[in-house]
Every structure is written in structure tokens, then in C-alpha cells.
Amino acid sequence: MANKTVFIFGASRGIGLGLVKEFASRGWHVVASERSRSDDLHALEGDSLRIVTADVTEPGSYADLGLADGGLDAIILNAGITGASHQSAQQATSDEVAEVMMTNAFGPTRAAKALLPKLKDGGTLAVMSSLMGSIADSSGGYELYRTSKTALNMLAKGVAEQDAAARDIEVLSLHPGWVQTDMGGPNATLTVEESVKGLADVVEGAGGGGGFRYVDYSGKTLPF
Ligand SMILES: NC(=O)c1ccc[n+]([C@@H]2O[C@H](COP(=O)([O-])OP(=O)(O)OC[C@H]3O[C@@H](n4cnc5c(N)ncnc54)[C@H](OP(=O)(O)O)[C@@H]3O)[C@@H](O)[C@H]2O)c1
């Protein structure tokens, strides 16, 4: 049987880079994107990894990545930012709101819709959300980041129902755990390796039959 292929959008460092290593070690072909050259990503370049350049906020940058229609088994839209350091709804400028919403919610959704034809029927479309996007779980704080991930969950569910279901593509809103990356910081509870192993298990076990799930790296369903 031919190797499976995953496209990881936002793979220059952190969880995205870890996912490239994890899927490659499982025998998958990987297409991985960077915004600007990542030496860590290029160090992995080989027969099973192809590197492309794309920005999730610029649809023109991923309009022609040389991906064949129906050629992908999974897409993982991982790119994300924390947003302005104050994280305050009161202080935020319009540009700050636009940046975090475009990068974390509307950008990935546009990319999902544009890239859907590249997925096989019965494939898996995953967006990298966060438990911080859960309204049920929230005690407030991190207002910019949280609302962008809540919006992403809503938009991803819409893609599942409006765009993906007819082709039996399952859509996942993933929470990677609190992970030791530039974003998560050194006090996070999980290493990148622990998180991506769980995330890859979840993605490998998904697909087929359509539907939508908001789940963490261990496969546990999260409350909206
Ligand atoms: N770490 C955690 O504890 C945690 C928890 C919950 C959810 N998450 C989510 O997991 C994902 C990855 O987080 P991380 O911890 O690995 O963060 P990170 O170390 O800060 O890496 C972020 C990645 O996103 C890319 N990116 C940012 N803006 C982009 C854009 N406009 N277009 C394309 N790529 C872009 C970055 O590329 P550059 O190198 O070019 O900037 C980098 O590859 C994010 O969506 C984040 O919200 C993380």
C-alpha cells in the first residue's frame, strides 16, 4: 500500500516541526510549510519531506503549492500566534484584533476551504485549536488568544458540516496540551515529543464518515 501523505501548515518550529518528525518516523510522506527559511525544518529534508513556503494569512501564498487534487490523506493547519502581549480586549487596537483573528481563525478557515480539494474523500482535516478556546472551560484572561480559538472552533465546525461532510472528511479541532515551545514556554507540562505522538495517534485514527470533534492530544473530547 502506498504511503500516506500529510500537509502540515506552519512547520518551522514548535509543535508543527515536531509533527513533521513524528509523521515521517511513522512512514508518512510529509509536505511542510514555512514562512521564511527554517534551518531546523530543512535539516529534515529528504525523500519523504517536501518543504513549501506559505503564510496562512495570505491566500495567494498557498494557491499553488503543487499539491495534486485528492493526493492528501490529512491536512493539519497548525500555524498560530498568541497575539498582542497585553491580551486585553480593552486595550487591543483594531490591527491587533485583526492580526490574531486572521492568523488563528479566519486564515486557517480560508486555507481549509481552499485546500479541501487536495484531500482524499474520507481524509482528515485538522486545525490546531486550544482548550483556551473552550467557553465551558474558561475562567477569563487571554482575551485575544481565547476568542480567536473559540472562533476557530466555530468556523471549523462549519467547514465540517458545510464543506467536508459530503466527502466523508472528518474535521478535528485539536488541543495539543500545554507544550514546551516558544508559545507554551519552559514551564509547560508536555514536551513537543509527547504532544505530537498523541496528536499523530488522533489524526491516524480519524477520517472516514465525516463529522467534527474537539479533542485533545490524548483523544479526549473537550467541552465547547
Ligand atoms: N504550545 C502550547 O502550549 C499550545 C497550546 C494550545 C494550542 N497551541 C497551538 O498550537 C499551534 C502551534 O503552537 P506552538 O506552541 O508550536 O507555537 P510556536 O512555537 O510559536 O510556533 C508557531 C508556528 O506557527 C507559525 N506561524 C505563525 N504565524 C503564521 C502565519 N501567518 N503563517 C504561517 N505560519 C505561521 C510559526 O511560523 P514562524 O516561525 O514563521 O513564525 C511557527 O511555525 C498554534 O496554533 C497554537 O495556538 C499551542
Image (spheres, rainbow, N blue to C red):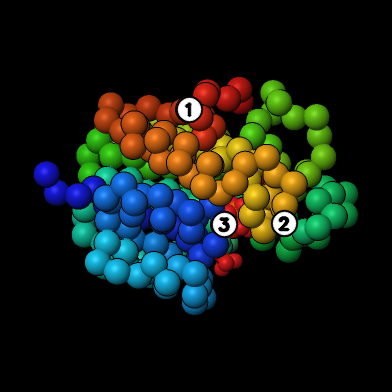
Q: In the rendered view, does 97 fall on the left or right side of 111? A: right
Q: Specify few, some or many for label 2: CA neighbours under 10 Å numbering under 14, 14-19, or 20 or more.
A: many
| Picture disc at residue 14 | 3
Q: Nearer the viewer, mark 1 or mark 2?
A: 1
Q: Quadrant of the C terminus?
A: top right
Q: Quadrant of the N terminus?
A: top left
Callout 2 amino acid:
Gly
**Residue corresponding to mark 2:** 83
Q: Secondary structure at mark 3?
A: helix
Residue 189 horizontal/vertical position (percent): 68, 40
Q: Residue furthest left?
A: 1
- Please identify the quarter of the rendering in which residue 84 is found: bottom right
Of labels 3 and 1, earlier in sequence is 3
On the rendering, which quadrant does ligand 1 occupy? bottom right
Callout 3 amino acid:
Gly
Would you place residue 59 above or below residue 8 in this image?
below
- Please identify the quarter of the rendering in which residue 181 is found: bottom right
Q: Nearer the viewer, mark 3 or mark 2?
A: 3
| Picture disc at residue 219 | 1
Callout 1 amino acid:
Gly
Q: In the rendered view, does 134 fall on the left or right side of 209? A: right
